[in-house]
Image: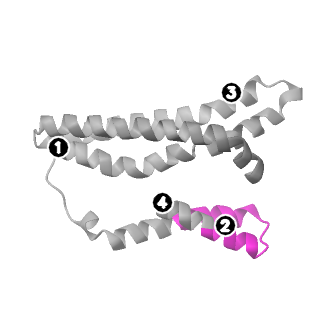
Amino acid sequence: LAAEGVARIVLCAALGVAGVHLAGYFGLALVLATIVATALVVALRRALLQPGPPGSFNELSRALGFLLISSVCTQFLLNVGTDAVQVLASPAQKAAAGKFLDCRIIAFIPIFLMQAVQGPLLAKLSGLAATGRRDEFRAALVQMLGLVAGFGLVSVAALALLGPFATQLFF
């Protein structure tokens, strides 16, 4: 996610510096950033291409089902606010949805940062659970929840102080 974010910024900044004004090129830059990030991660982490331990189809489909449900619910929660503001706004308040979206983008920066570490944390917890190391699993889970709570508190404080300035600066 970090590589993709950096690639998006670099490619879109390059298009901006080049004076490009067509949205299609920026859309293409976003897709290209995903391809660049994927190639970079695969090149740096060759172990990702190695076969893992065997697993039953039932186990895999159940795990993928939960992952799909959580991903859809996360995307719904991340995006429903802007739609709700747009639907509920009176004609005089139509700009409110755009302002809400601007603020939401700034407020979601910590969430996007947490998504970048979600994979490795999930892999660690899965490994501990799969090997039956319950005490280590519990300790890692408590430690992770503490870190997430601390990160959340720092993020809320930083957004309360800097959010209005950042929104004004970027939007």
Tell me the CA gap for discs 1 and 2: 41 Å
Can you see residue 58?
A: no
Left or right relative to 33: residue 53: left
* Quarter occupied by residue 67: top left
Amino acid residing under circle 2 = Cys
Residue at image location 56% in from the left, 36% down from the top: 156
Left or right relative to 36: residue 28: right
* Quarter occupied by residue 159: top right
Q: Earlier in the sequence, mark 2 or mark 3?
A: 2
Q: Which residue is mark 1?
A: 128
Residue at image location 87% in from the left, 27% down from the top: 91
Q: Which residue is mark 4?
A: 2
Q: Nearer the viewer, mark 1 or mark 2?
A: 1
Horizontal and vertical percent for residue 152?
48, 37
Residue range of the region highlighted in magenta in the rendering: 10-33
Q: Nearer the viewer, mark 3 or mark 4?
A: 4
- Closest to the observer, 110 or 96: 110
Crowding near the residue tagged with mark 1, few <14, some 14–19, many ≥20 C-alpha atoms within 10 Å: some
Q: Which residue is mark 3?
A: 84
Q: Give the farthest residue toward the left.
A: 132
- Asked whether 22 falls inside the magenta stretch, the response is yes
Whether label 3 touches label 4, CB < 8 Å: no
In the image, which disc is placed on residue 12? 2
Crowding near the residue tagged with mark 2, few <14, some 14–19, many ≥20 C-alpha atoms within 10 Å: many
159 shown above or below 15: above
Q: Nearer the viewer, mark 3 or mark 1?
A: 1
51 shown above or below 85: below
Amino acid residing under circle 3 = Ala
Tell me the CA gap for discs 4 and 2: 15 Å
Amino acid residing under circle 1 = Leu
Query: In what element is the residue under mark 2?
Result: helix
Q: Earlier in the sequence, mark 3 or mark 1?
A: 3
